[in-house]
Amino acid sequence: MYKRQEKGDYQALNFYYLPSRRCIILWSQKCACTSISKWIKASFEEAQQSGKKQSTRTYLGLNGYNFDNIRNLNPWIQSSGGEIQHVIISSRDPVSRITSSFVNKFHVYENRTIFDKNKRIQGFAKLFSKDLLQEIRHQSGEKRQRGDFSLEELIRYLYQQKDDLDTINPHFTPQISTEKRFEIIKNLINSNIKIHPLRVSNFSEDLQKINHSLGLETMPSFVNSTRLPTHEWRFDGTGSSASKRVSVLHQEKLIPNARALRELLQKKSDLQEQFQQLFQYDFALQNAMNELSDH
């Protein structure tokens, strides 16, 4: 196996601390984080001064309200002496989330493709792509251009790296990658703090409930960053598109959606087993949030 360079200590689950509403928001990349940032800027005094030069996320981080390590979240809440009354947990179906990451970072973002002059692969995605393609070349001897792999190959690569996920950018890894981190969520659910699910699949409905509970009113629209580049393009829900490399998808003007990956997982039992192992705690998180929303 190709030996990757160590890239850093990443975690997909981060949290905002917003004392004006005695609230914590757990958030992850590719879980409506842009929409959540817009809602925070419009609703919480801690973000009112964030402007055009800095994103809300960056502004909150520089001012001590955004944290990237949930390992000490429970002790931190306990030490606050009951100051925290609300915890909002954003979550997304893992199939939808990884499909969105693949499409937006390596194929089509907004209405631009990776082959357009105005579309550049972001630095972290370029680094991930380089490692994945190095692994493909190590195994098969095949040399490909940047970003030219399939969604299936991305998932299989992540599975190969399952014991080293903290060194991979969190756009591509599970929201929760270990049992110990899922225990943090379970402890929160079993505490006296009010837990608010914020599911991407029910974003508007869940946010309305949160607004009512926190005495807020702002309802930002959900931001979906994928649009068809031209009328010739189409979203595709067949499993074969999840196995096609980006160059082929571009040639055929196809954008695979979550239904395509679900169909592929049903057809390939080994891939489905790998996916279930990789995202087992994300599925557990989604189930927990669904149960809470039903109560």
Image: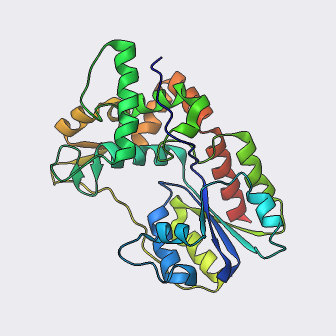
| Side of 9 relative to 179 (left or right) | left
- 81 in relation to 100, above or below: below
Residue 43 as seen in the image, left or right of residue 291: left
Residue 248: quarter of image: top left
Q: Nearer the viewer, residue 66 or 256?
A: 66
Image position of 141 with respect to 219: above or below: above
Colouring scheme, one of rainbow, by chain, secondary structure, one colour? rainbow
Quadrant (top left, top right, bottom left, bottom right) of the C terminus: bottom right
For this view, does 197 lie left or right of residue 44?
right
Residue 79 image position (x, y, % from top left): 83, 67
Q: How many marks?
A: 0
Image point 24% across, 54% down: which residue? 228
Q: Residue at x 75, y 43 (%)?
A: 180
Q: Position of residue 89 (x, y in %)?
A: 64, 62
Image-based side of 135 in relation to 161, left or right: left
Query: Which one is nearer the viewer's eye here, 287 or 59?
Result: 59
Locate residue 85: give its quadrant. bottom right
Residue 231 seen in the figure? yes
Q: Residue 256, can we see it?
A: no
Where residue 144 appears, as percent x and y from the top left, is: 26, 25
Q: Depth check: give the residue in front, 214 or 255.
A: 214
Q: Residue at x 27, y 34 (%)?
A: 146
User: 105 and 61: which one is in front?
Assistant: 61
Give above or below for 179 relative to 144.
Answer: below
Image point 79% across, 69% down: which residue? 193
Give the image location of residue 168, x and y in percent: 50, 39
